[in-house]
Image: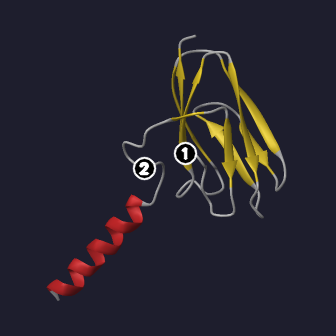
Amino acid sequence: MRLLLFSVALVALGLAAGCGPPAGAAPVRTDQVNLPPSYQFDPAVIQVVAGTSVIWTNNDHFTHSVKVQDGPDHVIRPGEDVSIPFDKAGEYPYICTFHAQDMKGKVIVAAS
């Protein structure tokens, strides 16, 4: 019984670890985020300077979205992209509202 509980706990921990951007992941300096055929944002954590517009491109076979904090939900069909401007310094978490369990990311905006 203990072995079963231990196995279940390990599986749950593994699943939780796969959700969202990797903890402590170093941000990538780019204004482009790819949505490859894998239910993820790549890279998941990016850094830009204030005044930059970030472009998310859906290269997956499924429709996704990008919702930054309290902003609107931008639906992106396969082959489409969306551009979102970031004018103020700060950290802006975002999700795909269709696949929020797996698709999470963050834009870190530095002062210009």
Q: Secondary structure at mark 1?
A: loop
Q: Please report the residue visible at 75 percent of the width from the left and 46 percent of the height from the top.
A: 57
Q: Which mark is residue 74?
A: none
Q: Amino acid at mark 1?
A: Ala
Q: Secondary structure at mark 2?
A: loop
Q: Please report the residue visible at 69 percent of the width from the left and 63 percent of the height from the top.
A: 37
Q: Amino acid at mark 2?
A: Pro
In the rendered view, tell whether residue 66 sits above or below residue 36.
Answer: above
Tell me the quarter of the image containing the C terminus.
top right
In the rendered view, tell whether residue 61 sits above or below residue 30.
Answer: below
Residue nearest the observer in this picture, 36 or 90: 36
Locate residue 108, reporting x and y percent.
52, 28
In the rendered view, tell whether residue 48 sits above or below residue 33.
Answer: above
Q: Which mark is residue 44?
A: 1
Asked which quadrant contains residue 84, the reply is: top right
Residue nearest the observer in this picture, 47 or 4: 47
Residue located farthest toward the front when viewing the structure as drawn: 29
Proximity of marks 1 and 2: CB atoms separated by less than 8 Å: yes
Locate residue 60, reporting x and y percent.
74, 60
- Please name the residue that numbered disc 2 is placed on: 22
Q: Earlier in the sequence, mark 1 or mark 2?
A: 2
Residue nearest the observer in this picture, 29 or 20: 29
Q: Please report the residue visible at 62 percent of the width from the left and 33 percent of the height from the top.
A: 30
User: Is disc 2 surrounded by few (<14), some (14 to 19) or many (20+) residues within 10 Å?
Assistant: few
Locate residue 7, reporting x and y percent.
26, 80
Q: Please report the residue visible at 18 percent of the width from the left and 86 percent of the height from the top.
A: 3
Tell me the quarter of the image containing the N terminus.
bottom left
